[in-house]
Amino acid sequence: MKRLKVYLFVGMVTAMLFALLLVPAVTQAQGTWTAVPSPSTNELHAVTSISANDVWAVGVGPITEHWNGSAWSIVSSPTVANGKLLGVAAASTNDVWAVGDFNNASGVRQTLIEQWNGKKWSVVPSPNVGTQPNELLGVTAVSANDIWAVGDVETVPSANFFQTLTLHWDGTTWSIVPSPSPSNDTLRAVAAVSTSDVWAVGDSGSGTLIEQWNGSSWSVVTSPNPSTITNVFNGVAIVSATEIWAVGDFIDNNTGAFQTLIELWNGTSWSIVSSPNPAGMQDFFDAASADPSSGQAWAVGSFIAFNP
């Protein structure tokens, strides 16, 4: 599986977490972060908030945890071999979707999709490309009848070669929707403006990859690359149709260190936006979120000491 570094500040985390407010500037403290006890020591990889009293976190196990406004609790979910839930999104409080992968009877990684219907989690059948390893890394819910999940297919396992994978839920079934795969490609995150304006981000070969759904097909949208070595997007967040943020990291051509990467869609093109990097560190952005009502956007990730 390609490099995946998404970790949430719930449970056991070994790297330090930091956040960057993209827009607008903060003029007043909005509170403080505190560690909240989690009933599991499993890795948690994704979180979605429906309200202050209704939050879901998912991870390896697979595991699903729920926040009721006072405490986190483990909610039973189907047991599958080597299951991982890596993305989660909610259409409503009684319609929550989590995606990832598991090992089938032959030990091959296959897509895993689970749904919360307000009473229980259950596995929903999801397609796979061929007999190769398939995985899902991100999901977004436009409505109960319009949900997207993205990831990749390992088309040449012996060569660690991937192509993009996009699945769509129409309210009845999940189906594979063709998506461009220009090189060695993975889609790691997805977010929607509307049913006819959906964005997925990841990487292609050594460069960034951004694709857009226009209501009828997926197409690659050109995005700049600051590095000639490695450029990756791990998260995408939407403020509006003309303000979309993609975040990730790249390897600096001069130092060899990973540095944060932020790009902005202004309705016409993608451009790199300067982002801070703690000195002497390797810095990563793993996820992003935005609040359209306030115009604020956040990126989170980690940094570790750089020893060239």
Image: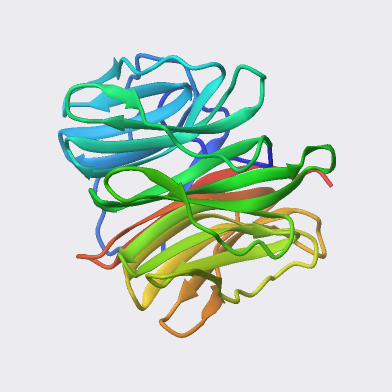
- What residue occupies the far bottom of the structure in this picture? 268
User: Where does residue 282 sit, x and y in percent of width and height?
Assistant: 68, 48
Instruction: Left or right? Give the position of 123 relative to 51.
Output: right
User: Where does residue 262 sit, x and y in percent of width and height?
Assistant: 54, 65
Which one is nearer the viewer's eye here, 40 or 195?
Answer: 195
Which one is nearer the viewer's eye here, 276 or 261?
Answer: 261
User: Where does residue 233 sit, x and y in percent of width and height?
Assistant: 58, 57
Which one is nearer the viewer's eye here, 181 or 227?
Answer: 181
Q: Quadrant of the N terminus?
A: top right
User: Where does residue 2 sit, x and y in percent of width and height?
Assistant: 69, 42
Instruction: Left or right? Give the position of 54 relative to 263.
Output: left
Against 84, residue 132 (above or below) is below
Against 131, residue 211 (above or below) is below
Against 262, residue 234 (above or below) is above
Q: Residue at x 38, y 17 (%)?
A: 78
Q: Residue at x 49, y 17 (%)?
A: 80
Instruction: Left or right? Give the position of 255 relative to 281.
Output: right
Place residue 142 in its image quadrant: bottom left
Instruction: Left or right? Give the position of 308 relative to 148.
Output: right
Q: Residue at x 54, y 71 (%)?
A: 219
